[in-house]
Image: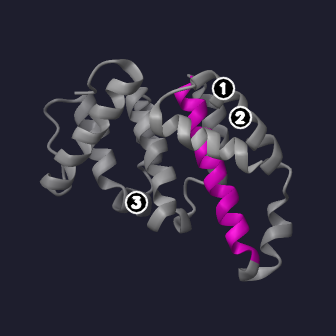
């Protein structure tokens, strides 16, 4: 189980082995979806880490689905991870950020618009909303800190070149 997740993380990070990553993502998804959330949550904080790990796995799997042009599979998984504010912190935040970056690169603007209707989410990930809106509207005036915005655009352009061979904007 962990090997599938580790493989997906590495594949996403390096933008390589896309097809195998999809196979591994499906394996990880099947293994973790069989774990009942109610069983995890009834045991309290001791197993909260398992729940958080499960949510992180789903974010990684969803990212692989988006990367492999299967966004509807990813969208179906979002309730399992996207608005879990425990994932919006520290190292867990990276899984959500990677997911957003892939949605931006894949130009899933209608779906991104729905995601950013959640004000709490929007506050935490404002710079990502700014990038997606700027990528679809050159006249958009971003609201996030300019240094953070420019750095994020640069990072997304590097990743976008790895995936598509060209800059996002």
Q: Which of marks 1 and 3 is in front?
A: 1
Which quarter of the image is occupied by the C terminus? top left
Note whether residue 99 is visible.
yes
Mark 1: give few (<14), some (14-19) or many (20+) Cα within 10 Å.
Answer: some
Identify the residue under disc 2.
Answer: 24
Find out whether residue 165 is within the magenta segment: no
Please tell me whether mark 1 sits on a helix, a strand or a loop.
Answer: helix
Q: Residue at x 57, y 62 (%)?
A: 84
Q: Is residue 58 located in the magenta-colored stretch of the structure?
A: yes
Q: Where is residue 43 in the image (x, y as percent from the top left)?
A: 82, 79
Mark 3 residue crowding within 10 angstroms, few (<14) / some (14–19) / many (20+) = few
Report the Cα–Cα distance between label 3 and label 2.
Answer: 33 Å
Looking at this rendering, what residue extends furthest in the top direction? 165
Magenta-colored span? 47-68
Does residue 161 appear left or right of residue 111 in this picture?
left
Mark 2–mark 1 CB contact (< 8 Å): yes
Residue name at image x 51 percent, y 37 percent? 12
Q: Do the residues labelled 1 and 3 touch (CB within 8 Å)?
A: no
User: Viewed as shown, does residue 104 lie left or right of 67?
Assistant: left
Q: Is residue 89 at least partly visible in the picture?
A: no
Q: Name the residue under label 3.
A: 119
């Amino acid at each position: 189980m962990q090997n599938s997740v580790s493989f997906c993380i590495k594949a996403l990070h390096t933008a390589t082995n896309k097809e195998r990553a999809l196979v591994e993502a499906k394996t990880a998804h099947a293994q973790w979806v069989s774990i009942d959330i109610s069983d995890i949550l009834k045991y309290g904080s001791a197993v909260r880490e398992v729940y958080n790990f499960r949510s992180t796995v789903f974010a990684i799997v969803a990212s692989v689905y988006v990367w492999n042009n299967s966004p509807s599979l990813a969208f179906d998984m979002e309730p399992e991870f996207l608005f879990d504010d425990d994932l919006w912190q520290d190292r867990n935040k990276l899984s959500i950020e990677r997911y957003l970056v892939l949605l931006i690169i894949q130009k899933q603007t209608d779906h991104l618009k729905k995601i950013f209707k959640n004000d709490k989410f929007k506050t935490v990930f404002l710079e990502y909303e700014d990038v997606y809106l700027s990528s679809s509207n050159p006249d958009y005036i971003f609201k996030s800190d300019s240094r953070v915005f420019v750095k994020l655009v640069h990072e997304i352009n590097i990743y976008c070149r790895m995936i598509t061979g060209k800059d996002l904007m």
